[in-house]
Image (spheres, rainbow, N blue to C red):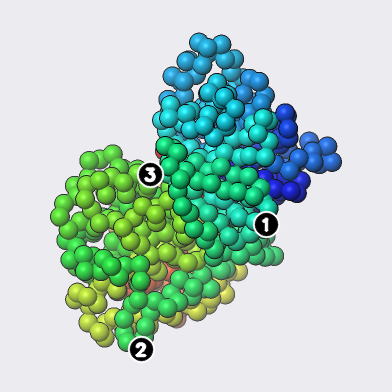
Amino acid sequence: MCGIIGYVGRKPALPILIDGLRRLEYRGYDSTGVALVQPSEVTVLKAAGRLSVLEGTLDYDAHPQTHGIGHTRWATHGAPTNVNAHPHADSSGKFAIIHNGIIENNRTLRTYLEQKGVIFTSETDTEVLVQLIAQLYEGDLEQAVRLALREVSGTYGMAVVCADEPDLIIAARKGSPLIVGVGQGEHILASDAAAILAHTTQVVYIGDNEIARITPDSLRITTLDAVPVAKETEEVEWTLDQIELAGYEHFMLKEIYEQPEALENCLRGRIDLKEGVIHLGGLADCARELTQAKRIIITACGTAWHAGLVGEYLFEELLRVPTETEYASEFRYRNPIIDEGTVVIAVSQSGETADTQAAIREAKQRGALVIGVVNVVGATIPRETDAGVYLHVGPEIGVASTKAFTGQVAVLALISCFLGRRKHLSPSAAMQFMKALSAIPDQIRTTLGHADTAEKVAREYASRENWLYLGRGYNYPVALEGALKLKEISYIHAEGLPAAEMKHGPLALITDGMPVVCIATTGSQYDKILSNISEVRARGGSVIAIATEGDKDIQDLADHVLYVPDTLEPLQPLLTVIPLQLIAYHAAVIRGCNVDKPRNLAKSVTVE
Ligand code: AGP
C-alpha cells in the first residue's frame, strides 16, 4: 500500500518528509519521491527502489524549502521505475501530485488530454490526474482539484502542490485514508498516524469525498461540492515508541513478544469476573439485534479470515447460530444471500482492506447489520460499520500479522461470550470461559518461553521448500494461519489442511523428511490427530507437533514437540499459533528474507 506524507510549516520540509517516508516503509513499496515547493518553483526528487536510494541522492542544504509532499509507491500501473515513481509533475513543472489508489478511467482521460496536446512522460494513472489539474487551473488550486475530481472515477488519497500557491497543499480522499496532524504553525498530512506521531498526536481525519485545504496556520475541509465540513481534532491513542523497534531486530518479532501485553490491553475492562458478564460498549446499541441474529457471515481476507474461521466455530458452539466465513473478495461478487436476521462481521487489522470495505458496503446495501472487528481506530471500515469492537492491540507494523490475529480471535471470543450469555450459555459455563480467556496473556508468556525450540525447528527445516500444517476443529484455522505465516515471510511453499483431509489426496505429497506441523493439543479430536501423525511418520514425514504441556506420550510419535499450556478447546488457537509464528519468523531470518517487508506484499491491500 502506498504511503503519503506532506508538510507545510516553518521548518525545512525535506528531513520531515524523509523521516515520514521511513515510518511508512512498513506499508510496502518499490519507489519513493518528494516534491518541494517554493514561490514559482516545484522541485521533484525521486528514485526506484528503497528509500535509502533516494536518500543517497539528497543534498539537504540545497533544499531549505518549508513545504512539500512525499510518497512511497507500490506499483499498480507501470513498473517501479524512476519515471513512474511519485510525485508526478505536469508538463509545465508547476504542479506536483502524489496519489494512493487507482484512477479507473485514466485511459479515457489520457486520450482526452493527449488530444489537447499534453505529452505524458510516465505510464501511470496518477500523471493523468496532475495533467488534468494543470489544464483546469485558473489561479485557484483547490478549485482546479475539485473540477478534476469530478471527472475522475476510482479511488484516491492524493495531495497536490503548485508553484503559484507555494504555502498550500490540497489533499483529497476517496477510499484511501488520509489524516492531518495539527501542530503549532504547521500541519503534517499522512496516510496513517505512524508518520505523524513524531510531531503531534492531535489529528483530523479526512473523510471520503472530502477536500482539505492545508496551510501552515489553517486547515479547511469541504466536500467535493465545496460544502464546508466541521471536523473535531482527535487524539491518536498510539505513542511513538509503540511505532519504534524498541531493541528488537524486526517489528514482527517485537509484535510476537508484545502479544501478552497486547491481549491484556484487548481484554482490559471487557471481562467482569465479579458480575460474570462481558462489557462491549461498541455493541451495546445493537445487542438485541445481534442476539436475535438468525445467521452470521464473517468476512475478511488473509490472516483476518483465519481468525474469522475460529469465530465461526466459536459462534456455532456458543450461540448455536449458523455461521459462515467468507473471503471478502468472493463475498463482494457472488451475489450473497442476505436476508432478515443476517449479521455480517468484518474482521480487519488495518480497517482499510479494499475487498473487505467492498464486502461491508455490499452487505449494508442488502440490509444486513454490519459489525467491525478492527485494530486501527478511525479507519474506513469502523467508520462505515453499524457498530464494532476495536482490538486495542496497538500498531502492527510488520506486514505479517501476529498480534492482530490473536487480538481478532480474542475479540471474537469476547463477542461469542457476550452474546452467548444472552442466549444459551449458562452463567457457570460463561464464567469458566471468561476465566480461561483472562488467563491467556500469561499463558502466551509461558509459550514464548519455549521460543528456542521453535528456532531449533526452523534451523533444521528452513531449507525444505514444501511444508504441511495439519489441525482439527479449532486448530484447523491455526494450521491455515501457520502455513500463511511461513509462506509470506520465508517464501517456503506451505499448505494448511484439516488433518483428516490428508488421506483424500495430500498424503501423496509426503516424502522422506518432509516437515509436517501437526497441532495435537489435548481435546475432542486428540486421538484422531495422533492417527494422522502416525500416517505421516509411516511415510517418512518429519512431524513437528504442537502439544499440551504434560503430554509425554507424543514425544514417541513426533520428531519435535513444542508445548503450549492447557486451555479450553475454543481458546487453544490463541496459544497454538504462537510457536507457528516463531517458526515462520526464524525460518525467514535463516533464509535471509526481509521479515518486515516481504517481497510483493503490503501491510494493507487497499487496491483490488
Ligand atoms: C497476514 O499476515 C497478511 N498481512 C494479510 O493476509 C492480511 O491479514 C490481510 O491482507 C488482511 O489485512 P487486514 O486485516 O488489514 O484487513
Three-letter residue code for mark 2: Lys
Circle 1 packing at 10 Å, graded few (<14), some (14-19), many (20+), is: few
Crowd tier of the residue under label 3, counting other residues whose Cα lies within 10 Å: few below 14, some 14–19, many 20 or above: many
Is the residue 437 above or below the residue 326 in the image? below
**Residue 236 point in image, percent of width and height:** 55, 62
- What residue occupies the far bottom of the structure in this picture? 274
Question: Which of pointers 1 and 2 indicates the residue nearer the eye?
Answer: 1
Query: For this view, does 583 lie left or right of residue 161?
Result: left
Nearer to the camera, 27 or 178: 178
Q: Compute the Cα span from label 1 to label 2.
A: 46 Å
Note whether residue 475 is visible.
no
Q: Which mark is residue 274?
A: 2
**How far is the residue under mark 3 from the one under mark 1?**
38 Å
Q: Residue at x 25, y 69 (%)?
A: 287
Q: The disc labelled 1 sits on which kind of residue?
A: Gln
Asked whether the residues under the numbered discs 3 and 2 touch, taking CB atoms below 8 Å apart as contact, a structural biologist would say no
Residue 184: image tag? 1
Q: Secondary structure at mark 3?
A: helix
- Disc 3 target residue: 355
Classify mark 3 as within 8 Å of ligand 1 or not, answering yes or no.
Answer: no
Q: Which quarter of the figure has residue 85?
A: top right
Name the side, left or right, on which 272 lies relative to 363. Answer: right
Q: Is residue 291 left or right of residue 582?
A: left
Q: Residue at 35% of width from left, 76% of height from top?
A: 279
Secondary structure beneath disc 1? loop
Q: Secondary structure at mark 2?
A: loop
Q: Quadrant of the C terminus?
A: top left
